[in-house]
């Protein structure tokens, strides 16, 4: 496909369950980002990969959040023991290069609801 | 204090109006600046980059004042289709490549 693809589109989890969210970036894109967007807020940075290397994970809110990109393409964001405050849209974005003006292309997100 | 601050609005304007959004950022190491647009329940999309010299794209004009750490977006001759949330975004320099988003300003253009 031409764009960033995320799955599932919607996820409902019971509190305490583990979830895994998938991101397929645009082919050849070096940089990959995960963001969390709560209702009425702007996207909040979670983590950044350059190829398979996780260069910045300063935005991950707790050790329940874990992200990987083992082969430098597809990425998975895993949330363990989900809590209600984890309910949000999780956005993945990729860009071709690391350059400061390389635009980000976002996927349409995974809307996570924790009940 | 948030790193990127915007007036959340909403801004309710009639078609044809000119509307201006402002944004301030706190990190003087910020290197690149953007405006993104986000429609309801959709992903953010790049509207335009912002350069120190100011730049224009059709009805949209963006300005950056590095000394004041201030970014603006002007929309002339508003259309109904401009209704969306406008996100002010800065990219930090150095080892991190992350973009920091503001909360967004909601614009509703009325017929």
Image: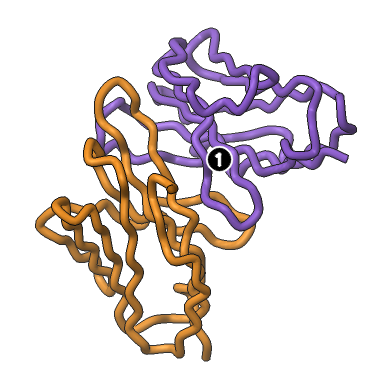
Chain colours: A purple, B orange
Give percent across and percent down for residue A53: 44, 11
Q: Residue at x 34, y 24 (%)?
A: B96
Q: Residue at x 80, y 38 (%)?
A: A84
Against B5, is B19 above or below? Answer: below
Front residue of B89 and A93 = B89
SS for dot 1: loop
Q: Which image quadrant: the C terminus of chain A?
A: top right
Against A88, is B63 above or below? Answer: below
Front residue of A24 and B4 = B4
Q: Is residue A73 left or right of residue A113?
A: left
Q: Is residue B31 visible?
A: no
Against A41, is A32 above or below? Answer: above
Q: Residue at x 47, y 13 (%)?
A: A72
Q: Which residue is mark 1?
A: A107
Give percent across and percent down for residue B76: 30, 80
Q: Quadrant of residue A62?
A: top right
Q: Residue at x 43, y 56 (%)?
A: B87
Q: Is residue A106 visible?
A: yes
Tell which subunit mark 1 falls on.
A
Q: Is residue B47 left or right of residue A87?
A: left
Give percent across and percent down for residue B53: 10, 57
Front residue of B32 and B67 = B67
Q: Is residue A111 left or right of residue A98?
A: right
Give percent across and percent down for residue A7: 69, 33
Q: Residues within 10 Å of mark 1 (few under 14, many from 20)?
A: many
Q: Is residue B49 left or right of residue A7?
A: left
Q: Which image quadrant: the N terminus of chain A?
A: top right
């Amino acid at each position: 496909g031409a764009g960033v693809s995320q799955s599932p589109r919607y996820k409902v989890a019971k509190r305490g369950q583990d979830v895994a969210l998938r991101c397929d970036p645009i082919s050849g894109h070096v940089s990959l980002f995960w963001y969390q967007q709560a209702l009425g807020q702007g996207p909040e940075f979670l983590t950044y990969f350059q190829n398979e290397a996780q260069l910045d994970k300063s935005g991950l809110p707790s050790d329940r959040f874990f992200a990987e990109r083992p082969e430098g393409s597809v990425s998975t964001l895993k949330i363990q023991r989900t809590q209600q405050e984890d309910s949000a849209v999780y956005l993945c974005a990729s860009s071709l290069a690391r350059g400061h003006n390389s635009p980000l292309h976002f996927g349409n997100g995974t809307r996570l609801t924790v009940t | 204090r948030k790193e990127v601050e915007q007036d959340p609005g909403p801004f309710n304007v009639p078609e044809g109006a000119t509307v201006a959004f402002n944004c301030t950022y706190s990190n003087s190491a910020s290197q690149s600046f953007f405006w993104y647009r986000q429609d309801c329940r959709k992903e953010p999309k790049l509207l335009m980059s912002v350069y120190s010299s100011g730049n224009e794209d059709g009805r949209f004009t963006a300005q950056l004042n590095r000394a004041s750490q201030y970014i603006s977006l002007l929309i002339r001759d508003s259309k109904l289709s401009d209704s969306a949330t406008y996100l002010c975004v800065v990219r930090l320099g150095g080892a991190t490549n992350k973009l920091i988003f503001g909360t967004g300003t909601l614009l509703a253009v009325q017929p």
